[in-house]
Amino acid sequence: MTKNSTGQRAQLKAVLFDLDGTLLRVQMAAFISCYVDGLAACCADLVTPKTFQQAMLGSIRMLVQCDGNGRETNERRVFSTLQERLAVPEKLLRERFDQYRRERVSELQPLVKPIPLARVILEECRQHGVQLVLATNPVFPRFMIDARLEWGELKGQSFCHLTCFENSRFCKPHAGYFQEILSQLQLNPEQCLMVGNDTQHDLAAAAVGMPTFLVDTWIVERDGPDWPCPQRGDHAALQTYLRDLLA
């Protein structure tokens, strides 16, 4: 954690927690594949499954790889991309997403496992009055985040803010993603801590001056900038680190 001009630790006001691999266990490659396949099945009368799968995976890559203009939400960008690539009216696409939510989202539950210590860590932060943010990459609709929280035995109401494609205009690792959250919290970056398991998507919070903690229990390593991260360890190490900060 950073120090202020008097040499004292800056007061920790908020902790941003990544979700997948940080607060719960999930194999994201299998999870995304199953999610896209289920959506494709709901759209099978509109477009061939293979065509839909290619368009949907392309829209997810676009969110992560493209900076965007900061004016459109990720939701708007996804549906615009799908409508353009599939030549299917947005109204119909939205209806099929809702059908998937009602009928098929539960198919993903076996891919998600709780991390009991993560629940304890969240509760200890909450008891110290620290704001909690669910800083999951906003490539999914809100119902997908709520479902994963439930399957991970986590309480959505614990978080003062969570990112989903309806309320976000950027994705990790773009600096705009973290700036949006800081604006929402009305905090300075040194008052926050980003906790995650991805060396690029989560540690990129350093680009806006936010301290980070790399949870390396189920680490995701990607090519890219070598972000500084003096603090790392498993969930037990994270708990110890946060207890020290909040003491």
Image (spheres, rainbow, N blue to C red):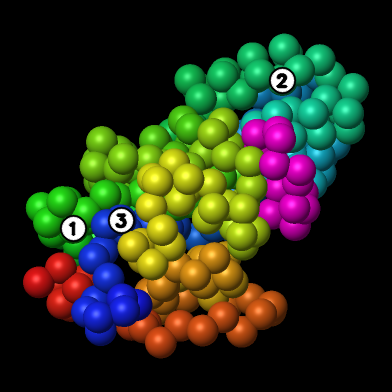
In the image shown, does 16 or 21 lie closer to the viewer? 16
Judge whether residue 61 can be spotted in this image. Answer: no
* Label 1 CA crowd tier, 10 Å (few <14, some 14–19, many 20+): many
In the image shown, does 23 or 126 lie closer to the viewer? 126
In the image shown, does 55 or 170 lie closer to the viewer? 170
Q: Quick check: is 229 in the magenta stretch?
A: no
Q: Is residue 192 above or below residue 221?
A: above
Mark 2 and mark 1: Cα distance apart in space: 40 Å
**Would you say the residues marked 3 and 1 are in contact, meaning their CB atoms lie under 8 Å apart?**
no
* Label 2 CA crowd tier, 10 Å (few <14, some 14–19, many 20+): some
Q: Is residue 86 above or below residue 162?
A: above
User: Element under label 1?
Assistant: helix
Residue at left 71%, top 35%?
A: 71
- Specify which label sits upstream in the sequence, 2 or 1: 2
Report the residue that reaches farthest toward the bottom: 230
Query: What residue is pinned by disc 2?
Result: 93
Query: What residue is pinned by disc 1?
Result: 125
Residue at left 49%, top 70%?
A: 209
- Specify which label sits upstream in the sequence, 3 or 1: 3
- Residue 83 in percent (x, y) is at 83, 25
- Residue 181 in percent (x, y) is at 47, 48
| Highlighted range, magenta | 62-74
- Residue 49 in percent (x, y) is at 78, 34
Image-based side of 77 in relation to 241, left or right? right
- Residue 231 in percent (x, y) is at 36, 83
Q: Residue 15 lies in what quarter of the image?
A: bottom left
Query: What residue is pinned by disc 3?
Result: 14
Q: Which mark is residue 230?
A: none
Please state which amino acid type lies under the numbered disc 3.
Ala
Image-based side of 3 in relation to 44, left or right? left
Q: Viewer-nearest of labels 2 and 1?
A: 1
